[in-house]
Image: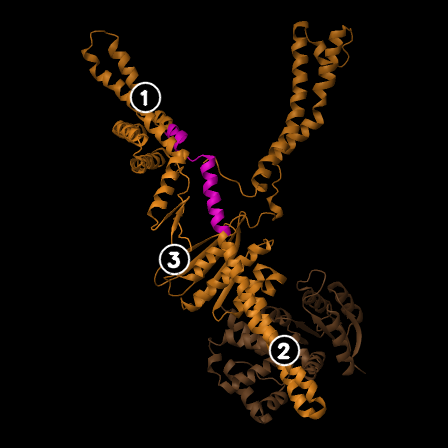
């Protein structure tokens, strides 16, 4: 059975493009809406397998989409939501990850250009994983870089950490960095050791642990 | 007692100072005559001298009498600017150096300023007024000391009473003298307005300037960035079109390049937008925008926000960019590790405090960044205060007055309980004395009816009946008018302080 998806995007061209793209990759688009209230209704009525949501939606053109997604997740815990935006903010990423139940994506709209990667991200979120935009991760790491113990990581370990924080599995990381999967495993074990995190196999938990750790390291006064 | 002794000392000092004015008066008369004869070069120094004298008395009035008198002069003319050809123009004359135009401007400024003439009037009358208010009591006291030598027996006690009265009255006399100084030396509505207009003029010019610079920067960024990339993309797409049939593999490679270029263009546009108006600011307001800024900063930044409503968008944006600049400064120049940002509301003022643990030594007069912040804030009457001792910590405080004008439901002050009770009693019981006990018995009395029924006043003895009726009528009317007047007075007092946007303080 094909995964059911709800799309919320106010620009007609982009909405149409998303619908076609996802249909071509075997998704069933149950609703394509263009405003915040409509989105909230669609999410709670349809209970889709995944929602692709633009942050800025009518009627206020502020963070309507984000608020609707958060509200829907409060009503339906763990509802998979992939948020798209023209710009990414750590602040929003933290809010999305705050409930700790995973199944969250947060990507720049530009990522839609690369259809394969985008659809892969949608699938990952639908399966309960995470997909964080590399830019969020880069900002997060840049602003945390000066603090201990992130400085203790080797450059290779940092690369692995970045990909891991985006929500990729060890297999995907090894493919990306042209390493063997066991080497990546060693790296992750070393990272977890240096950051003082309990190692775990579950991708989603892994990401959440990393992000929570990074955020916590920053917010300490 | 001590108060009186101090007052006597101050009065003596001010009085003697006023006596020396006689010299100044003589000098002014001579100078005025010379000026009238055409030797106008003596005028500016004379006015300068008089102004110094009046500034002294302004300061003494402020310090001793507790009622500061602000200077009342119109703002000085701006320095003359050379024309494009390097000459200086004054009316229809051209000069090589700025000296003559400057002198002319200055002379005109001094001569046409009403405050100059008010100063002159004050100077001429001051010896008389000061003599009356301040020195006369000393003369009376002198009489008392001389009294034992008078033959008249009444003289001694009378002089003693007069001297005592003089000592007791001294503080009040001093206050009277202060009032006299206020009368002629304090700023007039006109000079206050002139000063404000000049300031607004400058601020407007700066605001327009910085806006134009901003637009130029955006234009340049677009021209060199996104626009150029779009042109390149168009050209590459043209090449792809040609290659499509002949060499599909090369066309594909070029398409990948186009996609990359479009990504870069988007990144550049995103950065540009962030510099114009950050999306988070538009979406979430000042508090969250500053939180986002804090998250992106390499330092540990703690943000506290206590705002219930959003300020106007331009004010919000000015505050945001000021904070952003302060953060950059703290990291770049101060080498700070930790920063505390506090955004709060002080009455109607938006106050932002940025404290860091850096090395300090920030100087607004040197840093162009800080100057930029001041310019940005000036358009909203905002001020930047910096305390930055060498070695730190640095605290920058931004005040944006009246930024939170139309806000906060709590500004509606409810009436105190007792007032509400009085109003309720007035409306509910006012009719009782007015009609059955006031107007009705009055009509009955006038018509001459015999019935007294429930008119209590008519049961009284005859001579008390009319006063009682009048009293009842007045009581009823009084109750109604109090019930009417109390809420009006209350709402007016509170609405005047709330709804006046920028009150010009003219009666300083």
Asked if residue B392 is positioned above or below residue B416 in the image, the reply reads below
Task: Tell me how the rendering is colored.
Answer: by chain
Chain shaded orange: B
Q: Is residue A49 something that shows in the picture?
A: no
Residue B351 lies left or right of residue B246; in this view the side is: left
User: Where in the figure is residue B129, as x and y percent of width and height?
Assistant: 33, 24
Question: Residue B262 has which mark?
Answer: 2
Dot in front, 2 or 3: 2
**Which residue is pictured at 72% across the width and 60% down the height?**
A59
Which mark is first along the chain, 1 or 3? 1
Task: Say few, some or many: other residues with alpha carbon within 10 Å of mark 1 (under 14 / 14 to 19 / 20 or more).
Answer: some
User: Where in the figure is residue B346, as x and y percent of width and height?
Assistant: 52, 49
Question: Residue B132 has which mark?
Answer: 1
Chain shaded brown: A
Residue B87 lies left or right of residue B243; in this view the side is: left
Tell me, yes or no, whether the two marked residues, 3 and 1, touch with CB atoms within 8 Å. no
Q: Which residues are magenta?
A: B178-204
């Amino acid at each position: 059975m094909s995964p059911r998806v709800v799309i919320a995007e106010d620009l007609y061209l982009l909405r149409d493009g998303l619908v076609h793209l996802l249909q071509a990759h075997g998704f069933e688009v149950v609703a394509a809406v263009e405003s915040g209230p409509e989105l909230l209704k669609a999410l709670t009525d349809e209970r889709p397998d995944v929602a692709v949501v633009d942050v800025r939606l009518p009627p206020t053109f502020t963070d309507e989409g984000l608020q609707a997604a958060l509200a829907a997740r409060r009503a339906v815990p763990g509802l998979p939501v992939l948020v798209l935006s023209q710009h990414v903010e750590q602040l929003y990423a933290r809010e999305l990850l705050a409930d700790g139940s995973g199944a969250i994506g947060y990507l720049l709209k530009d990522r839609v250009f690369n259809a394969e990667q985008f659809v892969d991200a949608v699938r990952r979120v639908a399966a309960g994983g995470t997909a964080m935009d590399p830019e969020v991760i880069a900002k997060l790491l840049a602003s945390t870089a000066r603090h201990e113990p992130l400085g203790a990581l080797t450059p290779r370990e940092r690369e692995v950490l970045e990909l891991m924080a985006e929500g990729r599995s060890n297999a995907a990381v090894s493919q990306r960095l042209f390493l063997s999967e066991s080497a990546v495993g060693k790296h992750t074990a070393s990272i977890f050791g240096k950051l003082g995190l309990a190692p775990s196999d579950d991708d989603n938990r892994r990401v959440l642990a990393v992000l929570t750790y990074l955020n916590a390291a920053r917010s300490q006064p | 007692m001590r108060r009186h002794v101090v007052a006597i000392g101050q009065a003596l000092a001010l009085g003697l100072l006023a006596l020396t004015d006689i010299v100044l008066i003589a000098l002014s008369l001579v100078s005025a005559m010379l000026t009238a004869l055409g030797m106008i070069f003596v005028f500016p120094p004379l006015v300068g001298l008089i102004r110094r004298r009046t500034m002294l008395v302004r300061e003494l009035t402020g310090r001793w009498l507790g009622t500061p008198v602000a200077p009342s002069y119109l703002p000085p003319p701006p320095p003359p600017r050379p024309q494009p050809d390097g000459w200086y123009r004054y009316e229809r004359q051209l000069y090589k150096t700025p000296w003559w135009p400057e002198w002319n401007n200055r002379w005109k400024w001094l001569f046409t300023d009403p405050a100059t003439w008010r100063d002159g009037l004050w100077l001429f009358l001051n010896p008389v007024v000061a003599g009356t208010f301040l020195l006369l009591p000393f003369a009376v006291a002198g009489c008392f000391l001389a009294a034992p030598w008078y033959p008249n027996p009444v003289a001694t006690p009378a002089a003693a009473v007069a001297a005592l009265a003089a000592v007791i009255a001294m503080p009040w006399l001093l206050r009277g003298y202060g009032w006299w100084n206020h009368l002629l030396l304090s700023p007039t509505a006109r000079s206050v307005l002139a000063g404000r207009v000049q300031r607004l003029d400058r601020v407007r010019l700066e605001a327009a300037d910085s806006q134009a610079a901003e637009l130029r920067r955006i234009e340049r960024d677009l021209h060199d960035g996104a626009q150029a990339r779009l042109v390149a993309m168009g050209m590459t797409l043209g090449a792809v079109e040609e290659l499509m049939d002949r060499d599909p593999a090369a066309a594909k490679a070029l398409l990948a390049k186009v996609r990359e270029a479009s990504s870069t263009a988007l990144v550049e546009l995103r950065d540009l937008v962030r510099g114009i108006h950050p999306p988070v600011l538009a979406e979430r307001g000042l508090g969250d925008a500053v939180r986002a800024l804090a998250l992106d900063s390499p330092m540990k930044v703690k943000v506290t926000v206590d705002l219930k409503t959003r300020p106007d968008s331009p004010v919000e944006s000015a505050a945001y960019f000021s904070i952003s600049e302060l953060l950059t400064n703290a990291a770049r120049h101060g080498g700070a590790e930790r920063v505390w940002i506090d955004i709060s509301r002080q009455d109607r003022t938006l106050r932002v405090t940025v404290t860091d643990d850096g090395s300090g030594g920030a100087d607004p007069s040197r840093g162009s960044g800080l100057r930029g912040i001041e310019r940005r804030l000036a358009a909203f009457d905002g001020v930047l205060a910096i305390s930055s001792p060498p070695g730190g910590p640095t605290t920058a405080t931004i005040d944006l007055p009246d930024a939170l004008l139309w806000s906060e439901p709590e500004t509606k002050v409810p009436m105190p309980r007792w007032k509400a009770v009085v109003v309720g009693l007035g409306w509910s019981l006012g009719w009782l004395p007015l009609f059955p006990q006031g107007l009705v018995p009055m009509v009955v009395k006038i018509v001459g009816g015999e019935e007294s029924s429930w008119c209590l006043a008519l049961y009284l003895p005859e001579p008390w009946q009319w006063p009682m009726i009048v009293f009842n009528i007045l009581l009823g009317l009084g109750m109604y008018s109090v019930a009417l007047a109390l809420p009006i007075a209350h709402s007016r007092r509170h609405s005047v302080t709330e709804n006046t946007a920028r009150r010009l303080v003219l009666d300083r």
